[in-house]
Amino acid sequence: GLERSRVEEMIHAMQRAGAGSLQVISDFDMTLTRFAHNGRRVPTTHNILDNRLLISEDCAKKMKDLLNTYYPVEIDASRSTEEKLPHMVDWWTKVHELLIQQKIRKDLLAQAVKESTVMLRDGYKEFFDHLAEQQVPLLIFSAGVGDILEEVIQQNRVFHPNTHVISNYMDFDHAGVLQAFKGQLIHTFNKREGALRRAAGLTALQGRPNVLLLGDSLGDLTMADGVSEPENVLTIGFLNDQVEQRKESYVNSFDIVLVKDETMDVPNAVLRHIISGRDRK
């Protein structure tokens, strides 16, 4: 119907402007990575830390308890973002405090990523490589752990120079032991502040008014708020979980909603259209 033609119009406008006017802004966990594989959840950057190399059994249990307390709040369709905010701050702050107590060693992070079952979505290589080839900046905006996120991309051999990351980075002491997290906390629902504060300062993104935005949470829709004078912002939402409860709000909020889709097929098709100026499928 009507919606479809609006999305098509936007894609055409973005195609006419070409790769030089485009930037891609994406969430990481459960957006660039898979939500599940063969019926099992794929770990987020925080979950990857749940490895005895890095944290104790007791710490892992406490993190799990926090997840069970706060995740239902995060995805509760009946609560407003405003209501959720203080809970998210509490959750992330408590997790970070627990991790700092564990004195995590920087030199063990790569091994923890290797041992994990983390997976990028099918079609990830085309996604990362195509953007790099066309010199389209990719801003990954994550409430996860930046050090782990970068390691995942590195180990999949798709960390290209066009990639910029805004996330929660670990601060290690001179001996390579975690002592704090850097900068201001980024959680699921304060990406807008991060976008205005940090993304706006990235010169690589300036003069690119067309945005393809990918996320799996309504909080991700604010990631483009740092773009100065945007012309077209096309949003793709991955609805991974609690589909029935959340479908309506996702359909009303994102331009394209992908339900339980573990691939990059749709973003890749959209990018082929915009960047190549024709459909190369």
Image (cartoon, grey):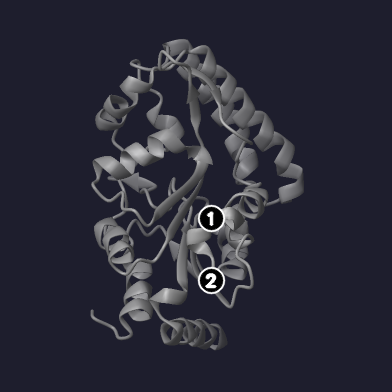
Q: Where is residue 53 drawn, in percent x and y?
A: 33, 16
Crowd class of label 2 (few under 14; some 14 to 19; many from 20; radius 10 Å): some
| Amino acid at dot 1 | Leu
Q: Is residue 166 left or right of residue 107?
A: right
Give the answer, above or below, for where 183 lies relative to 198: above
Secondary structure of the residue carrying numbered label 1: loop
- What label sits on residue 18 in the rendered view? none
Q: Where is residue 234 drawn, in percent x and y?
A: 52, 72
Secondary structure of the residue carrying numbered label 2: loop
| Amino acid at dot 2 | Gly
Residue at figure coordinates x 64%, y 61% from the top left = 225
Q: Is residue 15 left or right of residue 118?
A: right
Q: Residue furthest front?
A: 203
Spatial CA span between label 2 and label 1: 11 Å
Residue at figure coordinates x 38%, y 30% from the top left = 48
Give the answer, above or below, for where 70 lies relative to 2: above
Give the answer, above or below, for where 272 lies relative to 52: below
Crowd class of label 1 (few under 14; some 14 to 19; many from 20; radius 10 Å): few
